[in-house]
Amino acid sequence: MPRAVAVLLSLTLAVGWAADRLSTLPPEIAGAKQVAPATPLTYPDQALASEWGLEGAETASYAGPGRKFQVSVWRLKDPTAAFAFFEASRDPKAKPDPEHKKTVVDEPNGARFLTRGNYCLRFTGWAPKPAELDNLFHVLPKLDQASLPNLMAYFPVEGRVPNSERLIIGPASLDRFESRITPAMAAFSMGAEGGLAQYAGGETLTIFNYPTPQIARERVEEFRKLPGAVVKRSGPLAIAVLGSTDPSAAERLLAKVEYKATLTWNEGTPDVEVRRGANFLLGAFTLAGLVILMCAGAGVAFGLIRVTRGRTAKGEEEAPMIRLGLDNS
């Protein structure tokens, strides 16, 4: 019997896991209904899929009033992995959407590819409006909307090849996108987070962000060993230009990257301080009122108990009041 229970439990967990992987897309999107059950998608590069933490992927077709479209969805382990997947999976000729330049692109085949949180979605045959997207993301399971790293903001825009940016979060992505740098040089075990972009002169600009400037200084010395590399450090950033045939152009590109530390200072405004003091006084008066009510209630309850005991004593004399006898007589 215990063995049968274990087998049944295993089957239940397996079915639940499969249902979770195949239940990402809702049965209806913006008034269009799913015309057939969603089918799973596979990613050809298993090493990258594992590094990105690809938890599930599926595609489904929808039909509604006046439109038919297909939706493919990928759920990654976190927003950083989803953004890395987005950059690597968009069409090289995709054009950014004017309202969401970094996270939404329109591809040549008419599809709209986007990322939000730890999800990536591709709509073919229909481009959803922002409000329709918001409604969709409200029902997607396990949505993680943590902030994205700002590393890609350090890459100069001038001369950058469109859609060449790649976020590097581990050895697999480093090997696929810039194999001249080894995992030992990048030192992901030290908390490295990297990115790269191609430039019109044939240069590859790579930037790795480390927890401290001291670690970045050590990594820069390793990057200097790469043939033809032009390298520098800026704060916790280790920056290298690879593949350049013009050392002066490499130096100019390198000079455009500078680390800028940001400090957030939260200072209370007078209005906030006044409200805080008023709330404190209101709380104090409320507590005092509750204590007075409790004392009054206790006094009334004690009096009622005395009266009730007097009426139910059945002729028995009530216990006399205790006197201390402190008079002078």
Image: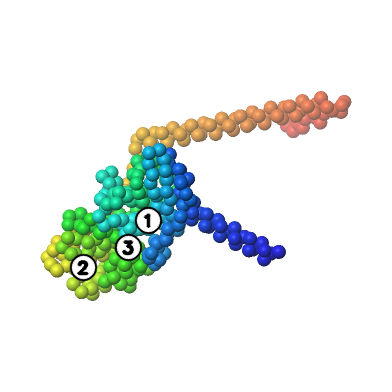
Which circle marks residue 256 in the picture? Answer: none
Tell me, yes or no, whether the two marked residues, 3 and 1, touch with CB atoms within 8 Å.
Answer: no
Where is residue 68? Give x, y as percent.
Answer: 38, 44
Towards the viewer: 150 or 303:
150
Tell me, yes or no, whether the two marked residues, 1 and 2, touch with CB atoms within 8 Å.
Answer: no
Q: Is residue 277 left or right of residue 18?
A: left
Q: Quadrant of the C terminus?
A: top right
Query: According to the image, label 2 marks what residue?
Result: 242
Residue 201 appears in view:
yes
**Which residue type does callout 1 highlight?**
Ala
**Which residue type does callout 3 highlight?**
Ile
Where is residue 211? Give x, y as percent.
Answer: 33, 62
Q: Which callout, 3 or 1, points at the residue further toward the start of the chain? A: 1
Q: What residue appears at the point 35 percent right and 58 percent down from the top-left corner?
A: 85
Query: According to the image, label 1 marks what residue?
Result: 82
Q: What residue appears at the point 82 percent right and 29 percent down from the top-left corner?
A: 318
Query: According to the image, label 3 marks what residue?
Result: 168
Outermost residue to the right: 315
Q: Quadrant of residue 154?
A: bottom left
Q: What residue appears at the point 42 percent right and 58 percent down from the top-left corner?
A: 41
Q: Nearer the viewer, mark 1 or mark 2?
A: 1
Q: Which callout, 3 or 2, points at the residue further toward the start of the chain? A: 3
Q: Which callout, 1 or 2, points at the residue further toward the start of the chain? A: 1
